[in-house]
Image (tube, helix red, strand yellow):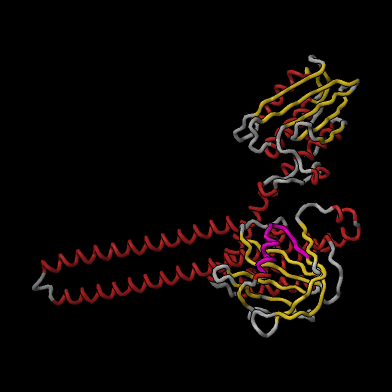
Amino acid sequence: MARLITYSDDASSELLDNTDQSKAFYHQLFLLHEISINLSQAQTLDELYRLAVTACIEQLEIDRMGILMIDKERDWMFGTWGTDDLGNIRSEADYASPMREDVKKVIREMSTRGKVCVWHDQDLYEFTDTPGEVATVGKGWNAAIAIWDKDDVIGWIACDNLLKHKPFQTYQSHILRLFGSLLGEFIKLKHAEQSLYQLNEELENRILIRTAELTQAQLDLEKINSELEEKVLNRTASLNEKTLRLEKALQDLTETQQDLMEAEKHRALNHLVIGMAHELNTPLGIIKTAASLQPELLNELNSDLAAGKVSKSRLTQVIQNGLEGYDIINTNISKMADLVTQFKRLSVVSNSASNIESIQLNTWLKQALKLAISHYNKPQHVSLVIQVTPDKAEIKADSWMLAQILEDLVLNSLEHGFDNQDQEIIKVSAVLVGNSCEIQFEDNGGGIDPAIVASIYDPFFTSARGEGRKGLGLNLVYNLITQGLKGEISHYRPPTGGCGFRIVIPCH
């Protein structure tokens, strides 16, 4: 009986613990860069599908693969490119059928972004000559990952091990996820290019129609002027009046023509800008892809210039491709810059000079916590409870590091902990024990899922990635405490619920 195993986009301990899998993963990750360059050269959507299947078979060590897309209006599915039972790459564009219930069940199963579904001991199928029917050709694992457009599943990638029967490896789930995301972005880009091409065709047709109308109006005007000239002696007064009306009509027609053309240009440009800004949310690897295309475009243009073969359409195409590449690079560089800015904060040495000073704990904690809460840019109502033993305890510590730790812990509670509590409470207690200071930071929020406690200090680990979080806060806290202050931090669940952190630092 088939067994379903799903893989999310969380970090995989199996991958980290297995050197062979890690090597294979990073090798295929490098190959994904080459694949992205190859896919970017596809001229049509059909060619993109073919190149994607070819790359997956030849470079990612997949026995068989197929790409199927969904027509939601008709509730149909249709093939693109895939492989037969011998591993030969072939077009499956003639395959189309209504969505079967078993297929819908598969789509529902993988309708979580980044989720890879693998069925083990599964019957493996092959399309037959009869549309909508498949034949069983073997048994093994069958993997599937959805292709997304915004929040909608528009298709899926299916692959199996029919030919070589190699077992499915965990790192392959990460590679398939990255490959599916990369393919999805290129599919959206091709759809945007097609929409732009259709929009340009519509604009050209409208311009032709307007030009024909203007030409006909001009011909009509010339005919009327000819007739008026014959009657000029007898109807001078009438001719002057009609001439003024015709000139005004011609002026209005010309102005209307210009207004229509300008409106069409602005609308086309507006749609282009909105479409590109909305769709081009590519992974970091696309920066290299886009940058590598620039020399090729310029070299081809230079060759055409030298040969005297540069046409207006060719020059326009090169300029447009160059500008699109710039937009892609600039957008992703901004994202990278934001990530680097956050990532630089992880360097304890570079972010803090020596700020060792005497701290009166009770007063300092009140000021530091209120300041941390004030930095939060969303409305909040938090009650602070501070306890220090002894009451007037003083320590010598790096005030910058300690303030940064408290600010990140407060932000963690406000962002992840509180969830419609009747009263939001943050409690901080400090106790001097010998030459150490023990600080307990607690909130009464929802707490941390025990399944992820072991990973909370890992860099880039977050339970709120869908909300734009990078997962660097608790990693920074951990680095500041263990490396900067030479202390220790541990997580616990308070008896009253919520989340708690125990921090022990030397107090000099």
Position of the N terminus by quadrant: bottom right
x, y percentage for residue 289? 70, 62
**Rendered image quadrant of residue 22:** bottom right
Position of the C terminus by quadrant: top right
Magenta span of residues? 103-118
Residue occupying image coordinates x 17% and y 67%: 242
Query: Quick check: 164 left or right of 340?
Result: right
- Kindly tell me whether residue 315 is visible in this rendering: no
* Frontmost residue, 316 versus 285: 285
**Rendered image quadrant of residue 2:** bottom right
**Rendered image quadrant of residue 83:** bottom right
Does the magenta portion include 113?
yes
Q: Residue furthest left?
A: 234
User: Please, is residue 64 above or below residue 362 in the view?
Assistant: below
* Frontmost residue, 457 versus 111: 111
Residue occupying image coordinates x 80% and y 29%: 353
User: Please, is residue 387 above or below residue 109 in the view?
Assistant: above
x, y percentage for residue 417? 70, 37
x, y percentage for residue 216? 30, 75
x, y percentage for residue 98? 60, 74
